Amino acid sequence: MNSCFTKFLLLIALAMLAGCNSRRAEENKDARIKVTTTVTMVADLVRSVGGERVLIETLMGPGVDPHLYKAAASDVTKLQRADVIFYSGLLLEGKMQDIFTDLARSGRRVFAVTDAIPKEKLSAPPEFAGHPDPHVWFDVTLWKLCLEAVVKGLAEADPEGREFYEARAAEKRARLDELHAWALQKSAELPADRRILVTSHDAYNYFGRAYGFQVIGLQGISTVSEAGLADVAKLSDFIKEKGIKAVFVESSVPHDTIERISRDTGAKIGGELFSDAMGTAGQMENGYDLGTYEGMIKHNLSTIVEALQ
Ligand SMILES: [Zn+2]
């Protein structure tokens, strides 16, 4: 080979190596706390508290169903290199629980944000034999309590940031108080007898309890079990009997059964609700950013109230 060309190749190789090294040095220099989260709602909490002090990686993006989600090898790597791991808990991420337990046992900082909610505030439907309903984020007052777990976890990894985290959590609490007041007012626009919410899976029980809706989910609290034929027929009868005007599909659950019920009963599809995953960041609808927790709550409630009017 031409020696000039060989030198040229060598130079390129050296330049690439230098690039790699400087990139690695930059990553090491990044003083931000590395956080890995599961669902987008938890990422929203961490972002609100952590601000520019944290770098967040989220395993389950928009449209992903956490009940069914299994960790890929790349997810385990993301969990292992995190300074702190936050997940929602109460078996929402049912198929990942063993991984969290193992990581915690090996001394990693692993926090279920819902651990901050007092047990007596959780609802445990009888058909779930002792398991509490994990969908707590739909009662804004319960989700607000989870901020405490985020502050605790971040301050453990970054004690110097404690005051910063506490101040930001206090700001978020104030914003969530406003959101809760807005939600109470918005749901009151609908007469009590019209407040019946029919969706694919039982994600809205806390929502119903907080904002005065009767909630009927076709699949149980988890999407792991599928709706049986008898359930579909029973629900269709109920919709016709009550004269319910609209039923709702969910962004992270297949739409087919609810669409069939809509055809069978004449109730229209009232819109797509976000249940176990938020929308994409910056995805605007009616002025709400669906990639934020506040935007998701406002979108859901506005959609429900408008369709059932
Ligand atoms: Zn769910």
Image: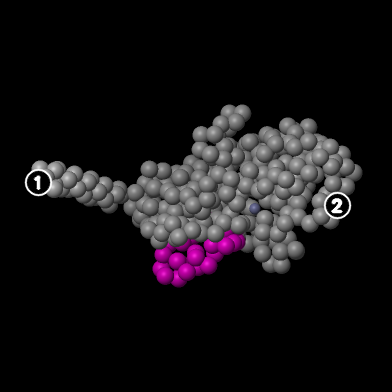
222 horizontally vs 64: left or right:
right
- The residue beneath circle 2 is 234
Task: Confirm whether residue 278 shows in the render.
Answer: yes
Tell me which label, 1 or 2, sits earlier in the chain. 1
Q: Are marks 1 and 2 in contact (CB under 8 Å)?
A: no
Q: Residues within 10 Å of mark 1 (few under 14, many from 20)?
A: few
Residue 115 percent across, percent down from the top left: 55, 60
Residue 106 included in the magenta stretch of the image: yes
Q: Nearer the viewer, residue 236 or 127?
A: 236
Q: CA distance from mark 1 to mark 2?
A: 82 Å
The residue sitting at 42% across, 48% down in the picture is 56
Residue 276 percent across, percent down from the top left: 61, 49
Tell me which segment is drawn in magenta: 91-114
* In the rendered image, the vertical position of residue 223 relative to residue 290, given as above or below: below
Q: Nearer the viewer, residue 277 or 139?
A: 277
Q: Residue furthest right?
A: 241
**Image quadrant assignment for residue 81:** bottom left
- The residue beneath circle 1 is 3
Residue 27 percent across, percent down from the top left: 29, 49
The amino acid type of the residue labelled 1 equals Ser
**Helix, strand or loop at mark 1:** helix
